[in-house]
Image (cartoon, helix red, strand yellow):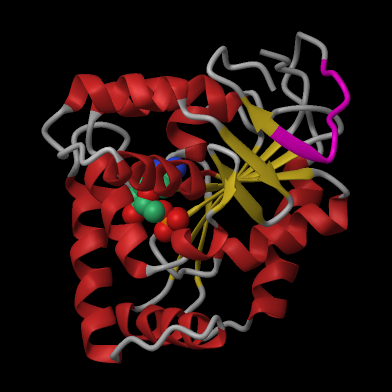
Amino acid sequence: MPVSVPVVCIDGPNASGKGAVSRAVAERLGWRRLDSGVLYRALGLAAARRSLAPGETGRLADLAAELDLELRGDRVLLEGRDVTRELATEEAGARASRIAVLAPVRAALLERQRAFRRAPGLVADGRDMGTVVFPDAACKVFLTASPEVRARRRHNQLRHQGMDVSLACLFEAIRERDERDRIRETAPLRPAEGALCLDTTHLGVEETLERVMEHVRTTGRRAPPGGSGKPGGGSHRQTPSGDT
Ligand code: DC
């Protein structure tokens, strides 16, 4: 792993604002971005296509290791087909959360996520970026917001994408997913040691971004010692061999 490449980790629950913030931070720094939730969502979709049940841990882990996934900016190609829209649904999020409790599945996705770490730097968002995937990162952020505000944000997001879901159903789905992500044994959702914890309930994206950028300025550009990075490209294709 090219460990000298700096990483900014942005973790938090569903709809805490980490997607918008990590995208903006990556843009400002000119670094690549990893939305790790996409890997779990894509795996969930691939598993559903094969009618794999959450109990089929071995087959799900094999599938995670072999998954043919290409991330082109914000577009996601699974087995050569654009599935961006399918992955944006709350159903895809819930499916992802159910398979994300499985330790062998998480292990199979670990190196795939670390392969995104390329010069000049990476902004990674998810649940365990700072605790498990990039524990040596110098800059870690944990975003939260009240469940009500998060449900409203997600509701707006989905409506913006043309998906109509009731706010009450969404609130319940988010609550259930948060609980599952928080109490699981492997890589549960929690702030990493030393993370800047920001409650964004009363903060807009701009203000959150400024506070995160301030933290990045004081910590995040520092690369951990040792190793050497290699330049990254525009799209990121992951083959069964794990090549990128
Ligand atoms: O961030 P998201 O909503 O796209 O993530 C979907 C689910 O995937 C989330 O509920 C739990 C799982 N996930 C995870 O366990 N670890 C990550 N680093 C990212 C997502």
Is 149 located above or below residue 132 in the figure?
Answer: below
Residue drawn at 19 percent across, 41 percent down: 184
| Residue 223 image-quadrant placement | top right
Residue sticking out furthest to the top? 227
The N terminus lies in which quarter of the figure? top right
Is 112 located above or below residue 125 in the figure?
Answer: above
Instruction: Pick the residue in front: 122 or 199.
Output: 122
- On the image, the x and y values in percent for residue 71 come to 66, 43
Residue 231 lies within the magenta run = yes
SS majority, magenta: loop
Q: Is residue 6 left or right of residue 140?
A: right
| Residue 209 image-quadrant placement | bottom right
Residue 111 lies within the magenta run = no
- On the image, the x and y values in percent for residue 18 come to 56, 62
Residue drawn at 73 percent across, 42 percent down: 219
Residue 127 visible in the snapshot: no
Residue drawn at 44 percent across, 83 percent down: 163
The C terminus lies in which quarter of the figure? top right
Residue 51 visible in the snapshot: yes
Q: Is residue 39 left or right of residue 219?
A: left
Q: Is residue 42 left or right of residue 214?
A: left
- On the image, the x and y values in percent for residue 80 come to 60, 40
Residue drawn at 54 percent across, 69 percent down: 17
Start and end of the magenta stretch? 229-236
Instruction: Pick the residue in front: 173 or 203.
Output: 173
- On the image, the x and y values in percent for residue 130 come to 51, 38
